Image: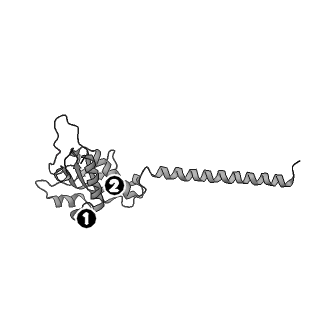
Amino acid sequence: MSSPESSAWYRHRLVWVAVVLLVVSVGTVVLANRSSTRAEPADLPAQIVARMRTTLERADPAQHQHAGHDAQQGAGAEKPPVICGVRVYGFEPAGATTFAEVRTVYGFHLCGIAEQKRPWDVAVKLAGPLIMDMSTDPPGIKVVEATAEVRFVDRLREMFPPAYATIAQQESLGATEMADLRRRYDAAAKL
């Protein structure tokens, strides 16, 4: 009842079904992998910047204040958000290729306390070089501060490796990071 021509057509049909299933499977795997990588930035420096910013913005300002600067808040008032821009000078171990391997980050932070309707120019700001200990959860924050006995630049040289201390004396945020910081601050302060 079945002719060789009809069984050849049937075999070709099975081949096409197998091809379609294979293509759909491969496409599903590719899409699943793409969506899972969007949860974190793909490159290590972007991951470090994101974690630094998040840590500083969630931390109490007392954890990264400098020279006695403090946010003035009324009694019982809700804490205004802290909006930060960061720059990574480097990290240790220097050969780390994944975020999980990073133990220490050297960088700079500039944060503004976004009190409602308070423009950036008069906002309380927290800024300066810092070291983040990424081996703890949440990461530990050490800021460079002068003391009565130790000048700021000397304290910076004590805390930072020489290459990063040199950068920290000359540079802070780049133009792109500063523009993003100001945009996010204005939104948080409802300006």
* Mark 1 surroundings: few (<14), some (14-19) or many (≥20) residues within 10 A: some
Q: Alpha-carbon distance for marks 2 and 1?
A: 17 Å
The quarter of the displayed image where residue 93 is located: bottom left
Residue that carries the numbered disc 1 in the rendered image: 167
Residue that carries the numbered disc 2 in the rendered image: 49
Magenta stretch: give its range.
Answer: 70-74
Count of numbered labels shown in the rendering: 2
Q: Main secondary structure of the magenta part?
A: loop
- 72 part of magenta stretch: yes
Q: Name the residue: 55% across, 53% down.
A: 30
> Is residue 174 visible from the viewing direction of this image?
no
Which-is-in-front pick, marks 2 and 1? Answer: 2
Q: Report the side of 128 relative to 13 (left or right).
A: left
Q: Name the residue: 31% across, 47% down.
A: 55
At which x and y percent is residue 10? 78, 51
Amino acid carrying label 2: it is: Val
Amino acid carrying label 1: it is: Ile
The quarter of the displayed image where residue 176 is located: bottom left
At which x and y percent is residue 71? 17, 45
Q: Name the residue: 25% across, 50% down.
A: 186
Disc ID at residue 64: none
